[in-house]
Image (tube, rainbow, N blue to C red):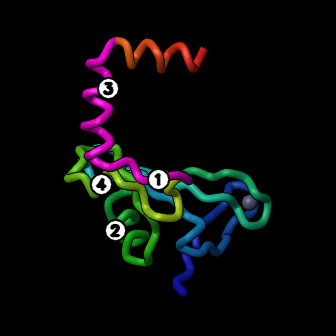
Amino acid sequence: MATIRTTCPECGEVDLTPESVMVSVHGDSGEGSYRFTCPRCTAAVEKRADRRIVALLRSVGVDVESDGPVEGLEALVPPPESRPAGPVFTPDDLIAFHFQLQDDRAVETELASLA
Ligand SMILES: [Zn+2]
C-alpha cells in the first residue's frame, strides 16, 4: 500500500494512506488542495496542491473531487462507498418527477403531506 508522507502544522512529518486523503481540484486549472485528518493529533489539515501534487496523489489512488465542469453522467454518480442508503435515483424517476411537478394537485398533496 502506498504511503503519503506530508506534514502536519502541529506534529511535523506524518504518514497517510490514500484512503485518508481527499483532493479537491478547482476548476480546470488542475490545481487545488488536499485535506486529511492528522493521525497523531486528529487535526483537520488542508494544504494547497499544485498540478504535480494532484497528479502524484491521484497516482497512488487518492479520491479526487472536482468543482470544475462535469463530464458525463458518471461524474454525477458518487462512488459506492459514499452513496446514500435507499434506491438509486434513475432517469426514469426524473421523468416521473417531471410529470408529477406539472400536476398541480399532486404537488399540492405532496406539500400538504410535508406540513
Ligand atoms: Zn498533527
Mark closest to the chain's N terminus, 4 or 1 = 4
Mark 2: which secondary structure?
Answer: helix
Q: Which mark is residue 100?
A: 3
Q: Which residue is mark 4?
A: 75
Percent x, y for residue 5?
58, 74
Mark 1: which secondary structure?
Answer: loop
Seen at 34% across and 68% down, the residue is 55
User: Which span of residues is magenta-colored?
Assistant: 85-104
Q: Are marks 2 and 1 in contact (CB under 8 Å)?
A: no
**Residue 27 vertical position relative to residue 111 in the rendered view, above or below:** below
**Residue 63 vertical position relative to residue 27 in the rendered view, above or below:** below
Q: What amino acid does circle 2 point to?
A: Ala
Q: CA distance from mark 4 to mark 1?
A: 19 Å
Q: CA distance from mark 2 to mark 1?
A: 34 Å
Q: Which mark is residue 87?
A: 1
Percent x, y for residue 111?
49, 16
Mark 3: give few (<14), some (14-19) or many (20+) Cα within 10 Å: some
Q: CA distance from mark 3 to mark 2?
A: 44 Å
